[in-house]
Image (tube, helix red, strand yellow):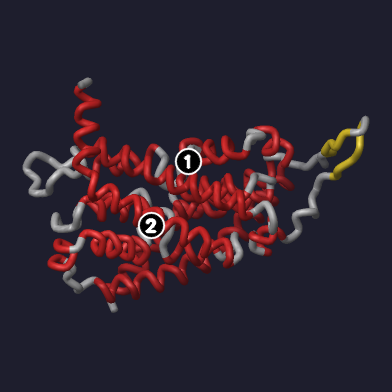
Amino acid sequence: MEQYILVFTSIVYEALPFIVLGVIIAGLLEEFVPQQFIAKIIPKNRVLAIALGGFLGVVFPMCECGIIPVMRRLLRKGMPLSLCVTYVLAGPVINVVVLTSTYVAFNYPPSSDSVAIFGGPKNVVLLRAGFAYLVAFNVGLLVEWLSRKPGIDLLSPQVTRGLKVNTSIDVKENGNEVEEKVKKTTMERLNNITSTALNDFVDIMAFLILGAILAAVGRALVQDTDFSKTVEANPPLAILIMMGLAILFCLCSEADAFVAANFPAVFPAASKMAFLVLGPMMDLKLYMMYTRVFRPRLIWTIIAAVVIQVFVYMLLLHYFGDSIAAFFQNFYSGT
């Protein structure tokens, strides 16, 4: 029971600061960013927009928990669903904080017994970011195709409710749509920001706690299981096991690299990479939080697309990992 409580509280405490940051940013977006601004900055070419969405984590460097409330507000502001999905999948990996922690985690000291994988920490960082971007971009394209027919029907009612009710009024001026903004006092704006942030916080936290409970139970069940002999002889199974552990452990993307780096050396390097790529995109707490943004049809489509891609890419990485490491080595040496 002590271990169960420790795991549960660690998941909640680990995610809590980022959720608070996320809901504050969401409140600011809701109050200060006009819908027309979002429409203007998004490229007309949707493929290009999705491609750029994979790098939004550089602008908003947040973990997966903090991104959810931000994404909800961006959707309400009119950002395309496919772009938001790309951001929510790639953002928790492609940001400075996470990539730096990954480098540090796999930068083993000379006295360490651990073996450097893929030729060193720099290669691990590049591979993690590259695979995360590839998976997110492909899922974004899939969501763009799906959203052409049902459109808003893929979103949860919690996101779409009251979208037409706004403090601004659309009027016609010289035949063009313009937005007439209602002037607000500082206190009114502050009240709107805190109200939005508080509503998002309560909504998201309820499902974070439920996900943390499920994760704590799952982690307790596998804690004493010895996979060493099994994974050493069966790399595809090792990849699947590490993907399952990534879903159960519910680690923050800013800390998961230290866990992956300390797994026994019998786990293939590709299985550790699977842990690093899949964890920030899909785990139990994220699934519960996704239910407050997407409808089940879209959630399961994203899950299937992410899991299949990660498994296939990691298999290829396992069998061609040495060639990739050699390529990096030749590239750095200029040969």
Left/right placement of residue 305 relative to residue 69 reads left
- Front residue of this view, candidates 271 and 202: 271
Q: Residue at x 35, y 58 (%)?
A: 251
Q: Which residue is mark 1?
A: 57
Q: Which residue is mark 2?
A: 14
Mark 2 in CB contact with mark 1 (< 8 angstroms): no
Q: Residue at x 35, y 66 (%)?
A: 248
Q: Few, some or many C-alpha atoms within 10 Å of disc 2 (few <14, some 14-19, many ≥20)?
A: some
The kind of secondary structure element at disc 2 is helix
Indicate the position of residue 141 as horizontal and vertical percent values. 55, 47
**Quadrant for the C terminus in the image:** top left
Q: What's the residue type where badge 2 is placed? A: Glu
**Quadrant for the N terminus in the image:** bottom left
- Front residue of this view, candidates 99 and 168: 99
Q: Quadrant of residue 241?
A: bottom left
Q: Residue at x 33, y 44 (%)?
A: 128
Q: Earlier in the sequence, mark 2 or mark 1?
A: 2
Residue 256 shows in this picture:
no
Left/right placement of residue 227 relative to residue 12 reads left
Indicate the position of residue 238 as horizontal and vertical percent values. 24, 62
Indicate the position of residue 12 as horizontal and vertical percent values. 41, 63
Q: CA distance from mark 2 to mark 1?
A: 19 Å
